[in-house]
Each structure stands twice: as C-alpha cells, then as structure tokens.
Image (cartoon, grey):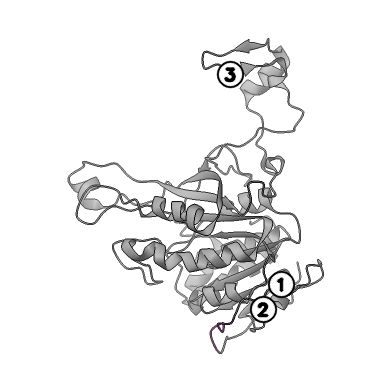
Amino acid sequence: MDTSMSAKPHSAQVEGESAVDEQFDSSPSAHPSCLVSQAPYFSSHYGSAYLGDSLDLLRALPKGSVNLVVTSPPYALHFKKEYGNETKDRYIEWFLPFAQEIFRVLSDDGSFVLNIGGSYNKGTPTRSLYHFKLLIALVEKIGFHLAQECFWYNPAKMPVPAEWVTVRRIRIRDSVEYVWWLSKTPHPKASNLKVLREYSEDMLRLNRRGLRETTRPSGHVIRASFNKVDAGGAIPSNVVESDEDGIPGSLMKMGNNAANDDYTMRCKEEGIKIHPARFPSQLPKFFIKMLTEPNDLVVDPFAGSLTTGAVAEQLERQWIAGEAVEEYLKAGTFRFELSERNPKLF
C-alpha cells in the first residue's frame, strides 16, 4: 500500500453538473480521482473520498465507469438520526435519483449491493413495507435485476421498539437486515469460487465414504458426484457469516457495536464523533471479493466511516466514496492508518 496518503479540507461541496459520459481512462494506472474534477477530501493509493452531496458525486462519474456500488444509506426510521434520514412515506422518492445515477455509472456487468434495514409502523406493533416497496421500484422503475437477496444477521441490534419487545413483550428482537444484490443485466460479473467456505466434516466424510445416486422426497436428484470436493471449498449461502480469519461463510453474522476496536479507540483519542451506524468490514469484503477483480472500481455514495473504501484498498480495488459529514470522513481516515499497521485488519 502507498503510504503517501493525503487528507485535506474540502472547501466546497461536490458541485452539481450534468452527467459526464465521455470516454474515460480505465487502465489500472489511472487513479479514480481522475474521474472527478472536484478535489478529494482524502486520497490513498487506490482511491479517494469526497465531502459533499453524494448525488452530485454520482452525476460527475462517467457512464459505465463503475464495477460495483456497495452502500448502506440512512434507513427510514421514526426517530431522526444525526446523519439525517428520510421518513418512510418519502423514502422512495428521495432514493430513486441516487438509484438512477447508480444504474447509469455501472458497467453492463456491474452490481449494486444495497444494505437496508426494516422498521415498525409508528404507534403499532406492525412492520413497515417501505424497503420492499423500494426494491420493487428499483426493479420496475429503474430497470435493475434482483440477482439475489442476502441477509445480515446482526446480534448487536437493540431490542426495539422497547414498547413492543421489552415492555409488553409481544414481539421478538429484530436482528436481521436486508442486503439486496442488484445488477444492471441478468448476468453480472460474479464468482462464488472467490468466497468459498471450508468443507464441513459431514461433506468430507461423504467424500471419503462415497455416495450413491438417489432422489430425495423433494424430487431433487442427488448424483454420485455430489460429494466431490474438487472446487476447494463449499459454496456459501445467501445468509453469510464471518469466521475467525474473516472469510465469509454460511451466515452473514456480524455485530456493529465494537467499543474497543482500533477505529473506535482512535476516535476517542482524537475527540472525534464515532459514526453511529457502521456496518462491519466483512460485509463489503464478501461482495467486493465475489463481484470484482483487482483494479476494478468500487463506489460507496453513503460512505460514513470509509469502511468500504478501506476494505477495497486492502483488496487492491480502486474506490470512490462520498459522505456529507466531514467529521465522519476525518475519522474514516484512521482506518487507512490502521490497515498500514495491520494488513490483515480488513
């Protein structure tokens, strides 16, 4: 990793401009900051972060220049977050302009990975459908294809709303968030060979013992080749977990409440506000590995504490990040200091 990283104040927000659709330099030697005329707030060897309106940042990117967009925008919650969030009744109207630009900047084999959480309807113990309505709009209005729905199990989520979960005890804790893998065409670039899990003991035992061809009651035919281990690992499911060495697996089980990790400790040392809704590095890592190749361009328009950018840096992918709150970006630069000291951090 290049240690000559720069962090400098951004004097103005990213300026709005018409879509830049001219030919762009996609060679590995071209730094992604070349795609945006505005000076970055922070740059590393592989990418740049920009302070300002993320919609303007997306509009500044050339058509077809991005291989993967992975992001987690503010959810539609009852209580207002300090980083800003829309109400459920306006959420789709607010988000679709971002989606239109994401569709435009993606390459034909590119992907859009969207992490979004659900919420309750105000005043009642029933769930909102806003995120499902958004998914339908992304497909039917924007033109995305739903490649696959995935799920993030977050054991650190609080038991809310307290009224229904901990006081009246008529609902259970909501610990799952949706991760929608969308694509511009039905056949985006992807390889599950990049995110294989270690084979289970049962699978290895089947391989040693051998397997006779049979048909399950469901009608699925189990062929003798079912027990082969030639691929080098098991295919992960759409509910993925990270194990001790950070390789994604069969359940996307990751907390986001770390209180003593290096990022949090550096924020405390510098007196900088910690981003209140960080997603774990394993989440973007899984999709960056599966859906991109080295030097591909990854974009996160709601970058927060620069988790996606730091992971992309470690995986030698180019990256661009946008964020409206300077304090979050300033703290996000700590992740690059940390990855310098510990290359396996992400």
Mostly what secondary structure, the magenta segment?
A: loop
Q: Could you tell me which secondary element the residue under label 2 belongs to?
A: loop
In the depicted structure, whether residue 129 falls above or below residue 71: above
Q: Which is more toward the observer, 219 or 324?
A: 219
Reply above or below: 335 against 284.
Answer: below
Quadrant of the drawing holding the C terminus: bottom right
User: Identity of the amino acid at label 3?
Assistant: His
User: Residue at point 46% right, 69% down?
Assistant: 274
| Residue that carries the numbered disc 1 in the rendered image | 32
Which mark is first along the chain, 1 or 3?
Answer: 1
Question: What residue appears at the point 40 percent right and 61 percent down from the top-left corner?
Answer: 75
Amino acid type, callout 1:
Pro
x and y, in percent, of residue 205 in the image: 67, 18
Between 68 and 323, the one nearer to me in the picture: 68
Q: Quadrant of residue 308?
A: bottom right
Q: Secondary structure at mark 1?
A: helix
Residues at marks 1 and 2, CA–CA distance in whole angstroms = 8 Å
Query: Which label sits in the foreground, 3 or 1?
Result: 3
Residue 317: image tag = none
Position in image of residue 341 (x %, y %): 68, 64
Q: Amino acid at mark 2?
A: Val
The residue that disc 2 covers is: 36
The answer to the question of whether label 1 and label 2 lie on touching residues, with beta carbons closer than 8 A, is yes
Q: Which mark is residue 220?
A: 3
At label 3, counting other C-alpha atoms closer than 10 Å, the crowd grade (few under 14, some 14-19, many 20 or more) is: few
The magenta span reads 12-17
Q: Is residue 218 visible?
A: yes
